[in-house]
């Protein structure tokens, strides 16, 4: 297993791919575009965007779109995810993952080793572990007593 260290993450490439994916975001209700790039342990990058819906609840976050694309193709080992956003004025800020997305990450990632890159642009970003953003999370191991 690759287990990339924080210093070796392809941060710039992940931010670029996430930024490009903002173009695919379907967010006519919130006007808040979100995109993610998800790095697998094999070094492949899957992207995802938020996909909203007129009935609101069926909408999906960018992070889960990326995870579900990868898992549905047989991938279950992940190293890092990068999240970017664009507001209705075209501004980019730091977009922390919602609780539901953190729970999905918890299913497939080792919390101490999975990195979450929150990027405003290529120069302004922060890197956290899932353990930092989702302490004492309930995961597959919790079912084993
Ligand atoms: N959103 C994401 O895609 N990821 C997050 O982590 C936070 C929120 C989306 C959901 C919705 O389409 C829009 O941002 C506003 O909440």
Image: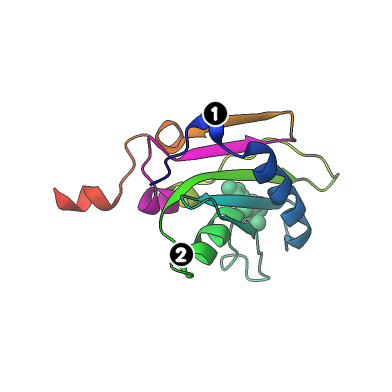
| Front in this rendered view, residue 131 or 18 | 18
Segment tinted magenta in the rendering: 103-121
Question: Which one is closest to the eye, mark 2 or mark 1?
Answer: 1
- Residue 103: percent from left, percent from top: 41, 50
| Front in this rendered view, residue 106 or 79 | 79
Q: Is disc 1 placed on a helix, strand or loop?
A: helix
Would residue 24 be found to the left or right of residue 49 on screen? right
Give me the residue at 43% from left, 54% from top. 104
- Residue 93: percent from left, percent from top: 72, 36
The answer to whether 46 is drawn above or below residue 95 in the figure is below
Query: Residue 127: which quarter of the image?
Result: top right
Residue 71 is labelled as 2
- Residue 98: percent from left, percent from top: 53, 46
Give me the residue at 73% from left, 45% from top. 16
Query: Residue 82: which quarter of the image?
Result: top right
Q: Residues within 10 Å of mark 2 (few under 14, many from 20)?
A: few
Residue 7 is labelled as 1
Query: Residue 30: which quarter of the image?
Result: bottom right
- First in sequence, mark 2 or 1: give its number: 1
């Amino acid at each position: 297993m690759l287990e990339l260290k924080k210093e070796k993450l392809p941060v710039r490439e992940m931010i670029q791919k996430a930024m490009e994916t903002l173009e695919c975001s379907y967010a006519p209700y919130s006007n808040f575009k979100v995109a993610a790039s998800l790095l697998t342990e094999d070094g492949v990058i899957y992207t995802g965007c938020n996909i909203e819906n007129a009935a609101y609840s069926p909408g999906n976050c960018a992070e889960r779109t990326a995870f579900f694309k990868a898992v549905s193709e047989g991938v279950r080992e992940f190293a890092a995810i990068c999240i970017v956003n664009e507001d209705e004025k075209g501004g980019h800020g730091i977009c922390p993952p919602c609780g539901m997305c953190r729970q999905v990450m918890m299913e497939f990632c080792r919390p101490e080793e999975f990195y979450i890159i929150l990027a405003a642009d290529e120069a302004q970003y922060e890197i956290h572990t899932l353990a930092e953003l989702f302490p004492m999370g309930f995961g597959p191991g919790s079912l084993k007593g």
